[in-house]
Image (cartoon, rainbow, N blue to C red):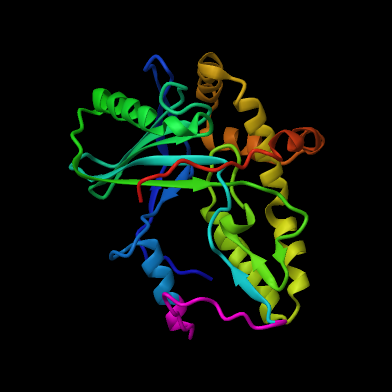
Amino acid sequence: GIETTFGVTPFREAILYDDSGREWRYQSSAPLFYMVRRGTGTGMLDIGLKQQAIDAGVTIRFNQRFPQTPNQPHVIATGPRGSFAIVVGYIFKTSLPDMVLGALSDRLAPRGYAYFVTSGGVGTIASCLFADLPHYQRYLANTVRFFEQRTGVTLETPRRFGGTGNVRVERSARAGEGLLVGEAAGFQDALWGFGLRYAMLSGHFAARALMNGNAAEYDPLWRNRFAGHIKTSFVNRFFYERLGDKGYRAFLARLGKSHDARDWLRSHYAPSTWKSLMYRLVRRHYRGARSESPRLPG
């Protein structure tokens, strides 16, 4: 029921690099993903959703604490608690054409990935770290140099940004009368850290439960829709963290042999019986993964 009153750019091609700088090009018949922009400017996702909410009769109150009304079910969407991973990078203006570049290298982003994206004259360069978080500045500098050498880009009036993420799969996403949605509930992909779709779906399910006057409906709704995918992502992350640079190269080569990158990735993201069994083992490994993140630039 959401209208695309914001900018959406589909990408059917991406280029990934291994630690040596070797290039791997991937294509898909259907979009691999859609690029949207976040923020308060024209055409951005946040503004588009805000206006649709207002048009639907929602009243938005900024800079106010939520009233603590006893026995009143409500939605809590306050962002991640703790840090499973961090992302740090720059946003900048560019004349480069739209493109998506990525890199798998522990020199750039230990146990994670680095990326360089341009869309509509705006570029983003970032390192997504899942290990050695306190030294993020070193990895970001390495990432900038890596993509500068491959694109010849010069960062024009760059704006630095940073953020954290935390992933969990609890039996319930309820906290008293509150329904936790998005990152507040830990709804993110453990392998790559994606969470926008989970945030929007969980918000929808929470609203549906409240509109039906039965907050207890919320947990079965989100569990049936995507709990299996988040559990699968933990299994994927468990194996990914053990690859190292040599394993990343093998991963990129296997993906490169696929006829359609989207279909190949879908098969690895899909829940399965053996991954459900494996999750029971790896969840103990990640149960204590939350930690205090270093101070990041806003």
Image spot of residue 265 (x, y percent): 58, 35
Residue 142 drawn above or below residue 78: above
Look at 65% across and 26% down and name the residue there. 239
Look at 58% across and 47% down and name the residue there. 166
Which residue extends farthest bottom? 57
Residue 156 drawn above or below residue 146: below
Left or right of 85: which side holds 62? left
Look at 45% across and 69% down and name the residue there. 3
- Nearest the viewer among 137 and 180 is 137
Left or right of 214: which side holds 99? left
Q: Is residue 212 shown in magenta?
A: no
- Nearest the viewer among 287 and 45 is 287
- Nearest the viewer among 10 and 242 is 242
Give the residues in magenta.
Answer: 53-71
Image spot of residue 101 (x, y percent): 37, 33
Q: Identify the main secondary structure in magenta.
A: loop
- Nearest the viewer among 119 and 90 is 90
Quadrant in the picture for residue 233:
top right
Instruction: Using the rendered image of the protein, determine whether residue 207 is visible from the camera's viewpoint.
Output: no
Image spot of residue 98 (x, y percent): 29, 42
Q: Is residue 67 shown in magenta?
A: yes
Residue 264 drawn above or below residue 193: above
Instruction: Using the rendered image of the protein, determine whether residue 53 is visible from the camera's viewpoint.
Output: yes
Look at 57% across and 81% down and name the residue there. 67
Left or right of 186: which side holds 113? left
